[in-house]
Image (cartoon, rainbow, N blue to C red):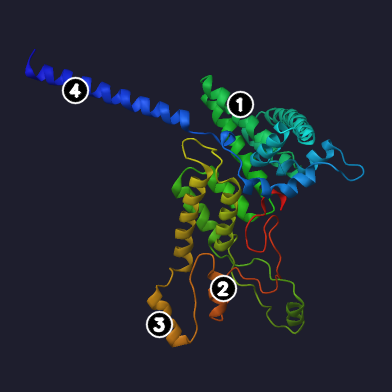
Amino acid sequence: LTGTDLLKKAAKVDTAGVDAMVKEQAAEESKTKKTFYETDLTPEIRMSYEDMCKNVLPPYKPGDTPATIVCNYYDQFDAQFIKVLNERSQNGDNDSKVILDTLAEEQQKRVAAATMALKEVLSKGEPMRMEGAIVKLAKEGRIDEPFLLLLEANADQARAAGAVGPAELMMKLRKRAAQEKDKQSASKEIKLLRQLLREENANEREKILEEAFTPKEALIVPGTAANAAKAMDGEAPEEEKPMPEVPPPDFINCCKAVLLNFGNLNIDEERGDLSTQIKLIASEAEVVATRIYGKGMTAREQQDRMWKEQTTSIFDLETLEIEAERRGETAPWANPNGGDELLPGFGADGKMRIGGQ
């Protein structure tokens, strides 16, 4: 053997040894890494679901049954709450077991309904008509998680069978269904976050954030009594200031709330757990909001402002509105006549009330 051959053989031996060590280490990590369902419940998590347990477990009001309770609270049975009920059931709580069994039955019913809905969509034949059928289903409130999962499962089956065209169609229908489902959401912040979580391309997420955060002129003049009086006098009515579809501080609070409740869920092995994805989106949102509304002030700039204007201000993504008020201005998204209404599911501190609290 020549010297070159010996070196090649030695390199192969070294590489094989390194590869073996890497594989062994990866195997050990996979053994020790726990899934969401294997992680232990903390006292804080149990406490956060105490009110929810009171809502779904006996004693019930007259006329209520486990079936009606599960149907009414179905959307609040998140993965964490099911873990809580499973733990109670394993500890001998028969009421929790009954609710879990009833929930399984309700899920089967919804999967059957989703199957029928999908057959309706596919019977349209043409992709455009299929999307039209999905819009109709959304307006009827018939698009839910089982329907989306069924579309995804069909796409996976088609892809595994080598049917690329049908797989792409199913994913296109799923994307449209998810968008239409989001339109029915009460919170624009949650709707935006869902849309961003589905988008893998960072440039596309940036475009979505810019569209949501950019203030827009109101197309309709508010029909207030003052504007009506001005119209009678022949004066031009006051127009509302441009407002963004989703105010940046509200979106950041929404991200924090979802992190608090579902941050440890691992929904995508390639992109990481939900916490990693939301933190990335929040940082992207901060960049876009800063580009639209301006950058924050340094400590020296704040001191200069205090000296010149005899006022203090703090520029932060979550306190843009407060800063504007301290300067005697109105933030683009501010509504002085809006009262103190809270978003559904959120407390006065801007945090989501988890576990039915």
Structural crowding at the residue carrying mark 3, measured as other residues with C-alpha within 10 Å and reported as few (<14), some (14–19) or many (≥20) = some
Of the numbered discs 2 and 3, the one sitting upstream in the chain is 3
Structural crowding at the residue carrying mark 2, measured as other residues with C-alpha within 10 Å and reported as few (<14), some (14–19) or many (≥20) = some
**Element under label 2?**
helix
Residue 2 is situated, as x and y percent measured from the top left of the image, at 7, 15
Drawn side of residue 277 relative to residue 335, left or right: left
Of the numbered discs 2 and 1, the one sitting upstream in the chain is 1
Residue under pointer 3:
304
Residue under pointer 4:
11
Q: CA gap, disc 3 to disc 4?
A: 64 Å
* Residue drawn at (68%, 33%) of the image: 146
Q: Amino acid at mark 2?
A: Ile
Q: Amino acid at mark 3?
A: Asp
Residue under pointer 2:
322
Q: Nearer the viewer, residue 182 or 278?
A: 278
**Element under label 4?**
helix
User: Disc 1 or disc 3, which is closer to the eye?
Assistant: 3
Residue 224 is situated, as x and y percent measured from the top left of the image, at 75, 75
User: Disc 4 or disc 2, which is closer to the eye?
Assistant: 4
Q: CA gap, disc 1 to disc 3?
A: 62 Å
